[in-house]
Every structure is written in structure tokens, then in C-alpha cells.
Image (cartoon, helix red, strand yellow):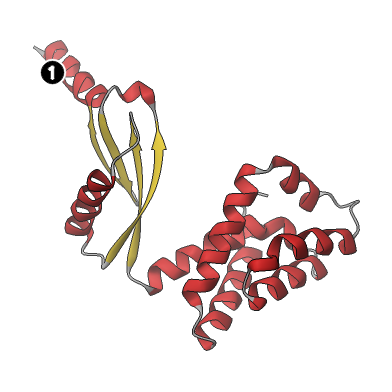
Amino acid sequence: MKGSSTVTSEIVEPYAQALMSLAQSSNITEQIGEDVRSLLSLLENSEELRLFLANPFVKDADKKGVLGRIAGELQPYTRNFLMLLVDRRRVIFLEGIGQQYLSLLRKLNQTVLADVTSAVPLSEAQQQAVREKVQGMTGARSVELQTQIDRDLIGGVIIKVGSQIIDASLRGQLRRIGIRLGAE
């Protein structure tokens, strides 16, 4: 379901843009954003669902049935959009379309996405401190955090915003000290 080829982007971008236009015209961009986040989380955590949706031998009616049960609590527009993807044989691109929709939503809301890797889970206060740091760096109205744990960092965090990387980890500090000592 993942891919960054030109063909994929030629499919993903128009569908995401269409969903965004629909959401904006109905003033439900945030609600559909929440639906998309839920779907992406489900896809991320269920290899079985990803394989089922990607399987060309599974009948469209079966895919619609499963998606209909999954989408029970979602916005009607989101449910209809999922069914359209099955009809057009584009459901394999659902993950990419969802990611692109969230990217459009962040742009609309002047929000930046910060990938934060830490040695241990961050407390709410630490997450807020990271948000404020990123807002100061970027001037964005708000910051969305995507957190990951990497025990090899020993301590501290690595923050990635676009192409910028702030390495405030102990592992990074030790590496920099090693480089300085090697240069002397």
C-alpha cells in the first residue's frame, strides 16, 4: 500500500484533494481528519487488513462489506469515499491518500508535523515543551507530534521537522564529543 512512484502520486494527490474539497464544502475537515487518522492507525496495526484490501482476487463486495463494518462510526462522507475507492479499484492507495489528506489538512491549519524520537515515552509537559520549541523554530500556528521510542538514544530526543533535524540525544552528544576528541 505504500509507494512513492510518480504513478502513485498521480493517483493519491487528486483523491486526497477531492476528499479535502468535499470536507471543506461541508465544513468537516477536522472530523474527516479524525476518520482518516483512525483508518491509518487501523491499517498500520493490521497487516491482515492491508493484505485483504490489496488482494485483487477478493471481490469488491467483500471489501465493501469489511470496510462498511469498519467505517460504522465514521462520517458518511468518509464511508462513501471508501466505497468509491473500492469501486474505482483504488482502495490499495488508501494509506497514501490518507497521508496526503492529513498533509493538506496540516497545511490548511498552518500546522507542522514533528517526528520526535526519544529513549522513553515523553510526559505531557515534555511534549508541550517540544511543541513550543518547534513553533518557535517554524512560526507555525500549531504542531502535531508523531512520537517513536528508540532505547539506543540513552536519553534526550531527536526532533525532525521537514528537512531540519535537532539531535538533543545523549547518543548524539557522545558522537559529537568523540568526533571532537578524534580531531585533536
Query: Looking at the image, which is closer to me, 101 or 144?
Result: 144
Q: Which residue is situated farthest in the left direction here?
A: 184
Q: Quadrant of residue 181?
A: top left
Tag 1 secondary structure? helix
Q: Residues within 10 Å of mark 1 (few under 14, many from 20)?
A: few
Q: Which residue is situated farthest in the front direction here?
A: 73
For image coordinates 51% across by 72% down, the residue present is 31
Query: Looking at the image, which is closer to me, 117 or 90?
Result: 117
For image coordinates 20% across by 64% down, the residue present is 139
For image coordinates 59% across by 75% down, the residue present is 19
The image position of residue 20, as x and y in percent, is 54, 76
Q: Is residue 38 left or right of residue 112?
A: right
Evaluate whether residue 96 shows in this view: yes
Q: Is residue 117 left or right of residue 17?
A: left
Task: Report the residue marked by disc 1.
Answer: 180
Query: Looking at the image, which is closer to me, 8 or 26?
Result: 26
Q: Quadrant of the C terminus?
A: top left
Is the residue 126 above or below the residue 152 in the image?
A: below
Q: Is residue 75 left or right of residue 156?
A: right
